[in-house]
Image (cartoon, rainbow, N blue to C red):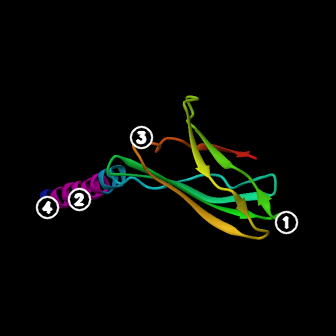
Amino acid sequence: MKKNNKKRIIMGLFAIVLVVLIYGIGKSLATPNSTLKNQKVDGLSFENATIDYTNKLSTFTVDVYNENKKVYNMKSINIILKKDDNDKVTLTYEIDKLESDEGRKIIIDQIDYNLDGYKQIKYKINK
């Protein structure tokens, strides 16, 4: 009877370890979207910024809202992404204006560079 209990305990522990390993491997193979901090710059609100890296291509997405009470004229927005090791990448989105209270989704896709590790973000408005 003691032998059967030991065998059950060992099989139970083996099953638990196996489940944990499968879960951990599955989680490490998945590439979750990186969500970046919301910011306000000169009356423009940048929200829900994400980076997705799939099939060796990155996609950057952010919602921008004009919270000013007038039309906001500009030439472009520089999106400066930074890693913890100070490596920087700058993306540029050309845009001429946003009406008062207008929102727009900025999508920059087909980026042939892995942006997955970039966790810091800064926006520069070019007027």
Q: Position of residue 102 (x, y in %)?
A: 72, 70
Judging by the rendered image, the residue that carries numbered circle 1 is 70
**SS under mark 1:** loop
Give the camera-side residue of 69 and 26: 69
Task: Please name the amino acid that badge 2 sits on.
Answer: Ala
Please report the residue visible at 81 percent of the width from the left and 52 percent of the height from the top. 42
Judging by the rendered image, the residue that carries numbered circle 2 is 15
Judging by the rendered image, the residue that carries numbered circle 3 is 113
Q: CA distance from mark 4 to mark 2?
A: 16 Å
Q: Which residues are magenta?
A: 5-22
Q: Is residue 51 left or right of residue 69?
A: left
Please report the residue visible at 13 percent of the width from the left and 56 percent of the height from the top. 3
Task: Please name the amino acid that badge 1 sits on.
Answer: Lys
The reply to whether callout 2 and callout 3 are in contact (CB within 8 Å) is no
**SS under mark 3:** loop
Q: CA distance from mark 4 to mark 1?
A: 78 Å
Judging by the rendered image, the residue that carries numbered circle 4 is 4
Q: CA distance from mark 3 to mark 4?
A: 55 Å
Circle 3 residues within 10 Å: few <14, some 14–19, many ≥20? few
Q: Position of residue 107 (x, y in %)?
A: 53, 58
In primary-sequence order, the first of circles 3 and 4 is: 4
In primary-sequence order, the first of circles 4 and 2 is: 4
Q: Position of residue 45 (x, y in %)?
A: 73, 59
Q: CA distance from mark 2 to mark 3?
A: 40 Å
Nearer mark to the viewer, of 4 and 1: 1
Q: CA distance from mark 1 to mark 3?
A: 37 Å
Q: Residue furthest bottom?
A: 101
In primary-sequence order, the first of circles 4 and 1 is: 4
In primary-sequence order, the first of circles 2 and 3 is: 2
Nearer mark to the viewer, of 1 and 2: 1
Circle 4 residues within 10 Å: few <14, some 14–19, many ≥20? few
